[in-house]
Image: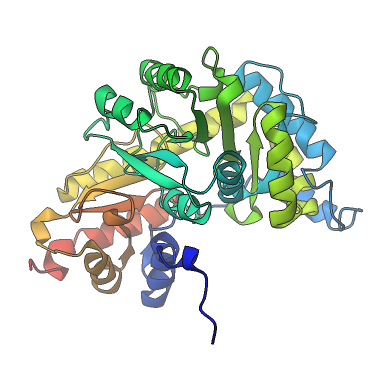
Amino acid sequence: MPTLSKRTENFTDSVIRRMTRISNQYGAVNLSQGFPDFEPPRELLDRLAQVANEDFHQYSVTWGAQNFREALAEKQSRLMGRKIDPNAEMVVTCGSTEAMMAAMMTVTNPGDKVIVFSPFYENYGADTILSGAEPIYVPLYPPEFHFNADELEAAFQQKPKALILCNPSNPSGKVFTYDELKIIADFAEKYDTFVITDEVYEHIVYEPYKHTYFASLPGMWKRTISCSSLSKTYSITGWRLGYIIAPDYIIDVAKKVHDFLTVGAAAPLQEAAVTGLRFGEDYYRELREKYTEKRNLFLKGLDDIGIAHTIPQGAYYILLDISEFGYRSDLEFCEVLARDVGVGAVPGSSFFREDVNHLIRLHFAKKNETLYEALNRLEHIRRKIKRK
Ligand code: GLN
């Protein structure tokens, strides 16, 4: 038989998605893959039911339905502080997973280098490999997950084509400050580099932290490819609606890549989601409040159990320190956790370039009752998982 492609040899399937399958197998409370178990806003579901009987069952325009792009442009123009052209400056994609992949294929050639902060969201590793690029990892140092500007500049000196910026950050929960973003912006300018952002948690930020869109920094619009999605903002991860916003000369190319990758995002879902894009400011405030309550509830529960953890400034992930259990493999620990304690988590090693085996990631985008159930189970963690 002929051999399969070389480009697929250097990465495994997603450990995040694998942990969901393992959790389901053991009937664990699944706090691994980040998605909610509560309903999306009622208005979106009602609109979805209507759309089923309307005329939205064929392809929409490949780079996104007009109605959807106009509503998205209006919302993001307000947030990003510039007038975004719905026809020339955006592409609607199948989730931000496609947006990030299309952005990478739009800006990189095989062999190009791309800066990735570590810890990082798992997909960026596979994205770089699939597009033939080579990652340069720059560490973020806990507890605040600061970067060292000299280390970052040393990475820029290796002539990368782009830097990937996940802000608010998965899995660290870091929200980059304006000053940190400015340092990145100055290097991007000095070394003439693109910045690809992943801002899917843009609306999930805890007081007193604030989200700054990288594209809104002085001079950065022309070199930023902003990727995001509706998944987390409207609790519709299964709808697979994402997008890229960038200047027209970049979008022209991203449209081509997207067209041949997927043709387009689901037309009926785009139409139904317009309802969400038109929500007023109250919706986003309530979303923040809801997640703040969940974060506080979950952090308090973990403190009562006495497990050391990170405190997220944004997004909905917490890294827990499992050193006390003495496991050398965090993957093995997560399997035991799902099987014996009944809680699904993601091994921290899936996010770190460095050799890190003492962290696991849990998320709290769940109904309060689900979080309480997980905490009840975690209370017995020391009885159920013996020190190795
Ligand atoms: N972003 C989510 C996580 O980190 C999952 C996204 C996905 O699986 N596509 O868990």
Circle count:
0
Write the residue at 54% across / 82% down. 2
Say whether residue 213 is visible: no
Task: Note whether 308 is above or below 78 in the view shown.
Answer: below
Residue furthest bottom in the image: 1
The quarter holding residue 1 reads bottom right
In this view, which residue lies farthest toward the top? Answer: 218
* 137 and 384: which is toward the camera: 137
Residue shown at 43%/71% (left/top)?
21
Residue 214 at x, y percent in the picture: 51, 24
Q: Report the coloring of the rendering.
A: rainbow
Evaluate whether residue 171 shows in this view.
yes
Q: Nearer the viewer, residue 291 or 190?
A: 190
Report whether 118 appears left or right of 44: left
Q: Is residue 374 left or right of residue 191?
A: left
At a point 12% along the width and 67% down the height, the residue shown is 383
Q: Could you tell me residue 379's position as x and y percent?
A: 20, 58
Q: Position of residue 308 (x, y in %)?
A: 17, 45
At x 37%, y 15%, the residue is 179
Q: Nearer the viewer, residue 306 or 198?
A: 198
Q: Nearer the viewer, residue 304 or 231?
A: 231
**Residue 300 locus on image (x, y percent):** 25, 41
> Is the residue 372 above or below the residue 158 in the image?
below
279 lies left or right of 164 = right
In the rendered view of the protein, which quadrant contains the C terminus?
Answer: bottom left
